[in-house]
Amino acid sequence: MPTYGKGLRGLSILTLVTITAALVLVFFYAPLDASQGFIQKIFYIHVPLAIVSLCGFVFGGLLAVMHLRTGDRRWDMRSYVAIHMALIFGVAALVAGSIWAKASWGHWWVWNDPTLVSYLIVLLMFATYTPFRFSIEDPERQARYASVFAILGGAFVPLNFIAVRAAQGFVHPRVLTLTGSNLPGPMLLTFLVSLLGITLLYVTLWKYEMAAKNARIQMRMLRRRLFGDDDISPLQRSAAPTL
Amino acid sequence: MKTALTVLRKDLLLELRTLETIPAMALFSITTFVIFHFGLNRPTIDGQLAAGVLTVTLLFAGILGVNRLFVAEREQGGMDAFLLAPVDRSALLLAKASALFLFLAALEVVAVPAFSLLLLGPSLGPALPSLIAVLVLADLGIAVIGTLVSALAVQTRARDVIGPVIGLPLLIPALIATARAIGPLLGSRGPAPLPGKWLLILALYDLVFALVAYAVFDFLLED
């Protein structure tokens, strides 16, 4: 059984260094935005968080495909952790975006922005992932159904963005378009370093949670082998995969 | 294909004999129009507002059908019987999605004239062909996603709640496209040309989710 702890220390240090570097760049290197001033700096946190969480949802869907293909429940655990983490990042992105919207557009929430709205819909969809898992008792069926859900969600993310973007005008600044970037050089560099930092943070947290879950499961297996089945308290019903 | 037809025939026969789902959906939609009339406090509506009221009502009435779709299978052990039979499992998806599609079509045969009678300001006649085209595409989307969601939810403990809660966010893009496509058709100065962009998005949505449903449906039946 893999332990997921391998290389975790190096990865954590790398994450810390990259995020520190990103923050230094944000506050001391990137120029102030001409129209928005200081508040625009939240962009370097908000956008990477949003991008990483969306990629995390799709990543969870891909891991779920692996689960259905192989039938190995560890893939389901990976998918669960990926979606769980993406959900946390997503809520953070929404809060950061709301603060930015209040500062630059004057409202906490605006409906006429497709990126914001489609993001909310994706979050609403994935917010049902955990209750859905929780309402299925049989762990094996829970894993299988949750994987189907995750695949549906993974396909839903890009489609939803197409539909909502077609529905509304553009208020949100386009950061990365098909034709390239709209940012001046120093801002682009800062943005990319932030994006890298947040991505590393996601990967690190994913590995930490996997390691913790894995350690708990192995601990349980060892206890069972040592003390027999009677001394182990029965597993409680849980939304998280138990293996 | 033959299996799908057999199951579909069974479902339609069951519905004809018990009349459990379609009358409930139709009554629900008419009651909702009445509620909208008082909620909006308007004698007639047109344009985008009318499109929104119609789409939301049809969607919620459709959810009623989605919730009932696999209930008979679950209660009577039909799922196990189907698994025992040496047939392709995708046939069940095809049969159930077709059944739901027909239920939705039957619902609209009642609900759209009722909407026109009770709430709609401009006359429905000139907009009808385009409206039917949009509704067919929307029904396809609701049928595919509804079948999948219903199969997901029927095995959970809180299935009456889980179904709509998963289904509604999944259907939001289809709902946006439908409402936006219908909006211009119900304008107070007669129907504007049908916006092709929205039909395209609806068709794309239907296609992608039909493929996804086909790919994953087998896993919902395994036991």
Image (cartoon, helix red, strand yellow):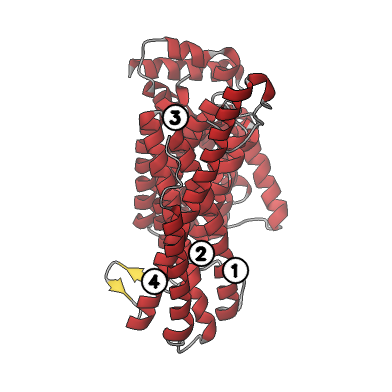
Q: Is residue B171 visible?
A: no
2 vs 3, front mark: 2
Q: Which residue matches tag 3?
A: B97
Disc 3 to disc 1: CB gap under 8 Å: no
- CA gap, disc 4 and disc 1: 28 Å
Q: Which residue matches tag 2?
A: A116
Q: Position of residue B41 (x, y in %)?
A: 71, 57
Q: Which residue matches tag 4?
A: A193
Q: Nearer the viewer, residue B215 or A229?
A: A229
Q: Quadrant of residue B218?
A: top left
- CA gap, disc 4 and disc 2: 23 Å
Q: Which residue matches tag 1?
A: A109
Residue at x-position 42% and y-position 48%: A6
Say if labels 2 and 3 share a chain.
no
Whether A46 is drawn above or below A28: the answer is above
Q: What amino acid is labelled 2 in the image? A: Leu
Circle 2 sits in a helix, a strand or a loop, which is it? helix
Disc 1 to disc 2: CB gap under 8 Å: yes
Q: Is disc 2 surrounded by few (<14), some (14 to 19) or many (20+) residues within 10 Å?
A: many
Say if labels 4 and 1 share a chain.
yes
Of callouts 4 and 2, the N-terminal one: 2
Q: Quadrant of residue A128?
A: top right
4 vs 2, front mark: 4
Give the chain letter at badge 4: A
Whether B100 is drawn above or below A34: the answer is above
Disc 4 to disc 2: CB gap under 8 Å: no
Find the residue positioned furthest to the front: A226
Q: What amino acid is labelled 1 in the image? A: Trp
Circle 4 sits in a helix, a strand or a loop, which is it? helix
Q: Nearer the viewer, residue A200 or B211?
A: A200
Q: Position of residue B100 (x, y in %)?
A: 49, 30
Of callouts 4 and 1, the N-terminal one: 1
